Amino acid sequence: MIGPPGTRPAGALLAAIENQFGGFEAFRQQFTASALGLAASGWTFLVLDPRTQGLQVLSLPDNGSVLPIGKAGLLICDLWEHAYYLKYKADTAAYLEAFWSLVDWNVVGERYLAFRTHFAP
């Protein structure tokens, strides 16, 4: 889901991010820190918890998925070396900086609204 460079979330997704994380920059910092905290290959996710309707950042090692733990994936960052090693080598931080410039926030926002509707109480 590659979007226009430099875009940010809007609408209901932005409101949820601001409510849950205290702002977009705080969310971005938490997501990046979680991704950098993976000891090996894996994934970092922004998820919607269907039970609470709240957002969470999760990092799962190896082939971990949010599906078996009942979370709905809104944004996923691949942290397996095949995703970035040829261009960034071991500089995961540089890869993550580039990742943020590629996120299509319209798609993430659409997923958020669709999952909220699907999981509404």
Image: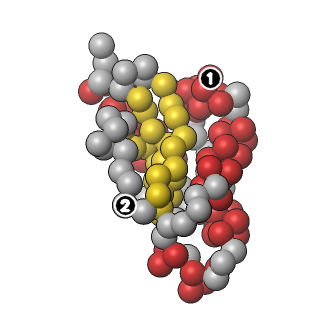
Q: Amino acid at mark 1?
A: Asn
Image location (x, y in percent) of residue 115: 33, 32
Whether residue 102 is visible: yes
**Number of numbered discs overlaid on the protein picture:** 2
Residue ID for mark 2: 63
Which residue is at the far front? 39
Does 92 sit above or below residue 75? below
The C terminus lies in which quarter of the figure?
top left
Q: Residue at x 37, y 21 (%)?
A: 51
| Image depth: mark 2 or mark 1 in front | 2
Among the 4 quarters of the image, the one containing residue 63: bottom left
Which numbered disc flags the more N-terminal residue, 2 or 1?
A: 1
Q: Residue at x 70, y 32 (%)?
A: 23
Does 32 sit above or below residue 94? above
Local secondary structure at mark 1: helix
Disc 2 crowd rating (10 Å Cα; few below 14, some 14-19, many 20+) is: few
Q: Tell me the distance, in whole angstroms, between the alpha carbons under discs 2 and 1.
A: 30 Å
Whether residue 104 is visible: no
Residue ID for mark 1: 19
Image location (x, y in percent) of residue 94: 70, 69
Residue 59 vs residue 29, the one in the foreground = 59
Q: Amino acid at mark 2?
A: Asn
Q: Residue at x 36, y 26 (%)?
A: 50
Which label belongs to residue 106? Answer: none
Image location (x, y in percent) of residue 1: 43, 59
Local secondary structure at mark 2: loop
Residue 100 vs residue 67, the one in the foreground = 67
